[in-house]
Image: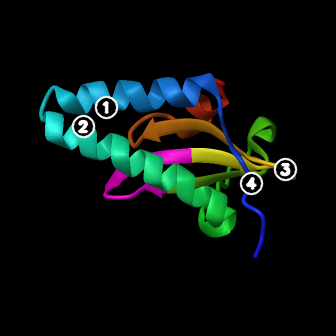
Amino acid sequence: MAKLKPIIRRPKASEDVESHAMYIADGSMDAALRFLERAEQTIKGLALFPQSGSPFVNSVPDLAGMRTKLVKDFPNHVVFYVEREDSIEIVRVLRGGQDMNTEATKI
């Protein structure tokens, strides 16, 4: 069995998750709690299956090697990550409608 790579979260990624949860909580606390749970499940799942996300196709050199994975049950929220040799680095968690190329580089 392959060794699980540790998950490393950039501070901005953690801020993103908190910010999205607070926004969702304005409409429904239950939905916000569900978002937090699903975001965590999605991120932890990358340790098991790092190739499960799709390559992030773009022309920005700083984003080379970046992959994306939709947050389970929240298809408008996208985890941006990079598989490193010894870890999975969570870079951002963005909401559809945000400029993905611009926001993903704000790390």
Identity, as a three-letter code, of the amino acid under mark 3: Asp
- Secondary structure under tag 3 reads loop
Disc number at residue 5?
4
Image: 57 above or below 61 = below
Q: Position of residue 8 (x, y in %)?
A: 68, 38
Whichever of labels 1 and 2 marks the residue nearer the N terminus, that label is: 1
Identity, as a three-letter code, of the amino acid under mark 4: Lys
Label 3 to label 4, Cα distance in Å? 6 Å
Q: Identify the image quadrant of the N terminus.
A: bottom right
Label 3 environment density (alpha carbons within 10 Å; few <14, some 14–19, many ≥20): few
Q: Position of residue 39 (x, y in %)?
A: 42, 46
Q: Residue placed at 45% from the left, 46% from the top?
A: 40
Asked if residue 25 lies left or right of residue 94, the reply is left
Labels 3 & 4 near each other (Cβ < 8 A): yes
Which residue bears the numbered disc 1? 21
Label 2 environment density (alpha carbons within 10 Å; few <14, some 14–19, many ≥20): some
Which residue bears the numbered disc 3? 86
Say which of marks 4 and 2 sits in front.
4
Labels 1 & 2 near each other (Cβ < 8 A): yes
The magenta region covers: 70-79
Q: Residue placed at 31% from the left, 44% from the top?
A: 35
